[in-house]
Amino acid sequence: MFACKYLYYLQLSGYNIFSIIKCFWYGFIKQKMLYFLFVFYSVLSLCLALFFQVNLYLVFTSFQCLLTLMFLNEFKLIKKVKFTKRMIRLFSCFLILYFVISTLIFSLVVSSNFIHFLYLILLLALPFVLIISLVILMPLEKLIANYFINKAKFNLGKSDLFKIGITGSFGKTSVKEILVAILKEKYNILYTKNSFNTPLGVAKTVNENFSNLNELFVCEMGAKKVGDINYLCKMIDVNCGIVTSVGRQHMQYFKSIDNVYNTKKELPDYVKNGFCVFNLMDKYVTKMFNDFRGERIGVYLSLQSNLKHIRCIKSRILCYSSLKLKGVFYFYPRTNCFSARRIEVSSAGTSFNVYCGNEFLFECSCKLIGIHNIINILLAVAMAIKLGVSVDTIRMSLKKIDKIAARTEIYNLDSGGIVINNGYNSNIDSAKFSLMTLSLYKSRRKIVVTPGLIETDNDYLYNKKFAILVAKYADEVVVVKNKNKKAICDGLVDAKFNMENVSYASSFSEIKNKIYSLDDNYVCLIENDLPDNFD
């Protein structure tokens, strides 16, 4: 399975040249597959040549074909690897080029006494041949990408479509799903499905789903480097925006929080003549709000005097200090902003009053849990009201939303247990919100299943901090995979967590049956999910 495992990693990274090198480093060197293949080739080829007097080159090429068939068969076994047209082009070019190179080498040294060293050389050449294949295909891939992007631009330019951009380190998919649920009650809308938030993902959405009847386009915007959001803004010519958060996500690409900030700020910078909605619970987004010169709308949670047992921590964010507190609050009086007041969060859902400035708008109730979802709802509500959706329509739309896939998604098991799936891209900033949801289940034993955090600027440091946070809410911890095992364990030890309640699993599939057979004494939070390319 190693071949598909690392090709999946390659797909996630957009077929980056450096990722190819990393794929082969982990797949061949670290896992010792190179040595296995070399010995396999050499011993089997030599045996066949000596005992059956078969030409060594024919044997070598035959095993090439055999391994290729085995490789193709693996695609059927691993669903996460998508046999896309781009993958087919890359794989075909690689096979042709590798076959030509091996043919030339063997034709030149077929009588050499050192022919078996050629097997090692050719195996070592695999990553370089793949890199050459990628370089050869780059002009073609760029032409294909430009074709689809230009087609999407043409489609978007054919009508008076009003375009909304949503960006942030986390929360953007949830805000998009909530906003779409509200807007579709009044408008014919086009929106990016799932987490299609790259230029080609957006182009795919537009080209496959665009209709002249569409009135609004809701576009989720992702980024891995400075300039990515600006590119998407220009591509779709966005009219207004929502900024959800600035956090330590994809830090292996961004390198610093300042780069994350500058990238997310590209959306409000582009819509400076329009309007933008900001999450004022985030100190970095608040700075964007203060600097924005267009029409700005902020959202925040308002502290109520009847809530007790509150303690203040950094950035004026208030957290649970006891199980009696129903949320996380940031209180700072603002005018002309949307706020949530009289908040009640339970395991059955969330209710709160929505205000615009000091004017009461409506009482909201929904099945989503977690304080972070209140912020997501407010961001969507502020945008919907600005776009002319009535309060009654918004209130009824929110009641219909029961879950958002892999984002504090609740499963009530037949066995009586509860599983909260927060398996999509957790980070140190967002993890505290999902962990707090465990406090809503006072009578149940709380289990956290996690592989830790990835793509931080210091994996050990932030996973250790993450583990200290986990220790505040969990009774049991299951550490999945080895990548962050040491950091998580060190953090739990520092937090004086009972290590007898810590267990380990090599994969989620190993403990899946156990999780989904929990009885009514347990609630289990699945926090983050490492892709297959990580051990």
Image: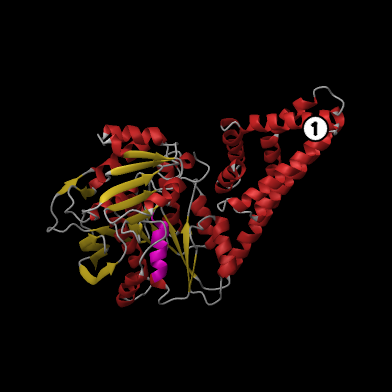
Residue 118, position in %: x, y? 76, 28
Residue 522, position in %: x, y? 29, 52
Q: Which residue is label 1 attached to?
A: 48
Residue name at image x 44 percent, y 47 percent: 508
Q: Main secondary structure of the magenta part?
A: helix
Q: Is residue 133 above or below residue 270?
A: above
User: Is residue 397 found left or right of 139 in the rendered image?
Assistant: left
User: Is residue 37 found left or right of 331 in the rendered image?
Assistant: right
Please check the rendered image and state whether residue 172 is part of the magenta-colored stretch, yes or no: yes
User: Is residue 278 found left or right of 135 in the rendered image?
Assistant: left
* Label 1 SS: helix
What is the number of callouts on the image? 1
Q: Is residue 282 visible?
A: no
Residue name at image x 21 percent, y 70 percent: 360
> Which residue is nearer to you in this view: 274 or 77?
77
User: Is residue 332 found left or right of 196 in the rendered image?
Assistant: left
Please check the rendered image and state whether residue 427 is part of the magenta-colored stretch, yes or no: no
State the extent of the magenta-drawn residues as a range. 171-181
